[in-house]
Image (cartoon, rainbow, N blue to C red):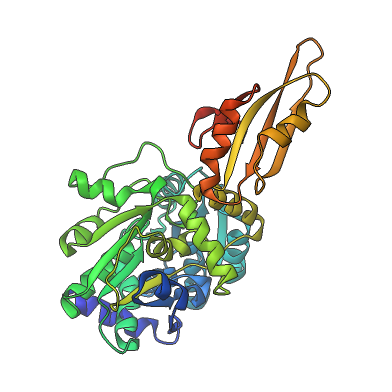
Amino acid sequence: MSFSRLVEDAVGRLAGVAERTPVQRNPRLSAITGADVWFKREDLQVGRSYKVRGAYNTIAQLDRGSAVVTASAGNHAQGFAHACATLGVRGTVVVPGTTPKQKRQRIAALGGDAITLLVDGDTYDDSARVAADLAARTGAVVVPAFDALSTVAGQATVAVEFLAQLARVPDVVVLPVGGGGLLAGCATWLREHAPGTRVVGVEPAGAAGMAAALVAGEPVTLAEIDTFVDGAAVRRAGEVTFPLVRDAGVEVVAVPEGAVCTEMLDLYQVDGVIAEPAGALAGAALASGVVTVDPGTTVLALLSGGNNDVSRYAEVVERSLVHRGLKHYFLVEFPQEPGALRRFLHEVLGPDDDIVLFEYQKRDNRETGAALVGIELGAATGLTPLLARIAAGPLRIQHLAPGTTAYRFLV
């Protein structure tokens, strides 16, 4: 059966189950890029992400007596839970410990008595192994988060919708990438139905598994990943999704987690949209210039998902400030004498600089005491004169650069 037929069948199964989410023009990104940028609002989907499309399409094709199991960082699990409850199928969800409590609560609410929720593993890949072992022991059917043709075909229904909703065929489509189910499905569909459209997949820089697979010519397992963008933090691209992405000839880029945080804040403060890190990937790529587009072109970016725990916003703000060069940390050796701090304030800080962290440990048996000092600048250009004033002064001050061992340990 052709892939187009699989997608058309998925459209039929999802009718009345998945929301036909709106396509909305985004003035902010349109102004930044000079293009006509539209968001496909899958953050308004059931479970606040496109994941329900693949989960339901897969489970709906199984025998109703089958028990099912899945692993997920959280969004696929919500779609899975909704599908189980809707279809009357018994399911088990395995999520890693990094899955925010907000997502766990939503999984339980959507699945109700139809699902059992297990927390096991540090990453999605760990949980996937637990789910596979559980299926082998119990005979339950594994419902992959991305690596199955039925899941890929379900995710491709997003492209069917936005092609029908836009007034013209988009010149560029920008999609978030984790394991590659959405990118594989939409790119394969677009290659046949909109062959002139440029398709770009966006991964978090700390978990760029699809890009690594394209370089190696096959899926590879990343030694380490940053789990901050939990909805896309996958160590290894899918065996099913990788060849589809490769053959579709798409571009795959990576955006720093700090740029994702900046986009999350802009979505919230400017656009009034609550997005989790994975939901901000496509917008971050456009806002930061990682993906460049020609002025006047039509650009479709997928916004999905919307499951952000408000307790994470402090870290989001921190990462954004560091990424934009506005927040810096220093180890300062203060002489244990009156007026040392006053001299630091007068001689080192600029007029627009602000101390936002000061942790001092006085040691009575030493002539100096070390302090961890966090400074927020009025503008990123203020760093060079700040470092110059530090170099000219008598205090011993060490700049803690992001990514260094000392930085990760102390901050």
Please tell me whether residue 360 is drawn above or below residue 187 in the rendered image: above
- Residue 78: x and y in percent read 51, 66
| Residue at the farthest top position | 365
Which quarter of the rendering shows the C terminus? top right
Residue shown at 52% from the left, 58% from the top: 262
- Residue 210: x and y in percent read 29, 52
Please tell me whether residue 381 is drawn above or below residue 77 in the rendered image: above
- Residue 42: x and y in percent read 45, 74
User: How many marks are shown on the rendered structure?
Assistant: 0
The answer to whether residue 73 is seen in the rendering is no
Hey, which quadrant is residue 328 in on the image? top right
| Residue at the farthest bottom position | 167
Residue shown at 49% from the left, 51% from the top: 258
- Residue 119: x and y in percent read 56, 49
Residue shown at 60% from the left, 68% from the top: 113
Hey, which quadrant is residue 171 in on the image? bottom left
* Residue in front for this viewpoint, 43 or 321: 321
In the displayed structure image, the side of residue 7 where residue 377 appears, left or right = right
In the displayed structure image, the side of residue 384 where residue 34 appears, left or right = left
The answer to whether residue 225 is seen in the rendering is yes
* Residue in front for this viewpoint, 146 or 225: 225
